[in-house]
Image: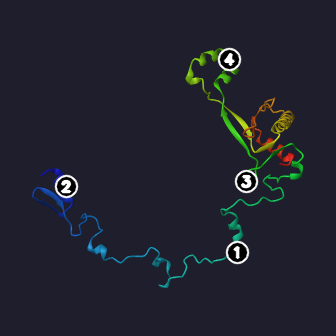
């Protein structure tokens, strides 16, 4: 008999070897060392999961509520404010502490263009991060490397550099007049603060089909101030 079989028989006394085959036997059909399935285990009384332990009771009298809380509807309005709304509520008619300002229709009618707000009552103003063409980047650095990298197709698509743009959507009316007024406003703001990170002149791209304006640079806050002054 091998050493492996000797260890199995030593650890499992209910093992019976018959006709050269090894068979595990127990009265409950389970592995002998497992308590489940035995008659003693099946006859044990079952305890409910929701049953209150005896340690929490006093003199055998179980309390009605463990925590002793009281049901009240006072202050439910504060709970209702943080619950999910089925629809977007109507905005107020006054400025809010967050900086949101309602539109001014009387002032907005004075301009030949109009900028609408989205369904969240905010400006459709976004930041787009676009890659820079490698050929444009090399032209800025050195023209000698431009001819070298033109021969390598895998490096002639995009460089590992990006530029940030400000995108304004939901424009109607004379979009070119809006682009002209917007660039004049941004130019005055840049000249006023004298920030070297802001480049002049202000570059923009007008898309008449999609009705949006793409401004080169991060001017989201300034564009929002411009729209507020126009009453949009």
Is disc 3 placed on a helix, strand or loop? loop
Which of the two discs, 4 and 2, labels the residue nearer the N terminus?
Answer: 2
Kindly report the distance in space between the C-alpha atoms of the residues bearing marks 2 and 3.
Answer: 73 Å
Q: Nearer the viewer, mark 4 or mark 2?
A: 4
Q: Is residue 211 above or below residue 57?
A: above
Kindly report the distance in space between the C-alpha atoms of the residues bearing marks 1 and 2.
Answer: 70 Å
Task: Locate residue 124, reporting x and y percent.
Answer: 74, 46
Kindly report the distance in space between the C-alpha atoms of the residues bearing marks 4 and 2.
Answer: 79 Å
Q: Nearer the viewer, mark 1 or mark 2?
A: 1
Kindly report the distance in space between the C-alpha atoms of the residues bearing marks 3 and 1.
Answer: 31 Å
Q: How busy is the neighbourhood of tag 3: few (under 14 within 10 Å), some, or many (20 plus)?
A: few
Q: Which residue is mark 3?
A: 120
Q: Which residue is mark 4?
A: 142
Q: How busy is the neighbourhood of tag 4: few (under 14 within 10 Å), some, or many (20 plus)?
A: few
Residue found farthest to the left: 19
Q: Which residue is mark 2?
A: 7
């Amino acid at each position: 008999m091998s050493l492996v079989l000797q260890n199995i028989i030593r650890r499992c006394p209910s093992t019976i070897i018959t006709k050269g085959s090894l068979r595990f036997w127990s009265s409950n059909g389970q592995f002998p060392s497992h308590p489940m399935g035995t008659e003693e285990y099946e006859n044990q009384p079952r305890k409910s999961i929701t049953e209150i332990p005896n340690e929490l009771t006093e003199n055998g009298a179980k309390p009605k509520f463990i925590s002793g809380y009281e049901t009240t509807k006072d202050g439910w309005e504060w709970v209702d404010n943080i619950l999910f709304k089925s629809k977007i509520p109507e905005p107020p008619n006054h400025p809010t502490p967050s900086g949101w300002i309602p539109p001014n229709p009387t002032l907005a009618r004075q301009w030949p263009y109009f900028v609408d707000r989205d369904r969240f009552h905010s400006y459709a103003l976004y930041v787009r991060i676009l890659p820079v063409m490698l050929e444009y980047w090399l032209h800025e650095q050195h023209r000698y490397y431009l001819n070298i990298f033109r021969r390598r197709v895998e490096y002639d698509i995009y460089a590992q550099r990006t530029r940030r743009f400000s995108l304004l959507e939901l424009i109607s009316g004379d979009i070119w007049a809006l682009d002209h007024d917007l660039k004049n406003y941004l130019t005055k703001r840049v000249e006023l603060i004298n920030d070297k990170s802001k480049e002049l002149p202000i570059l923009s791209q007008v898309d008449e089909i999609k009705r949006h304006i793409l401004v080169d640079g991060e001017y989201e806050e300034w564009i929002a101030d411009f729209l507020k002054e126009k009453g949009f």
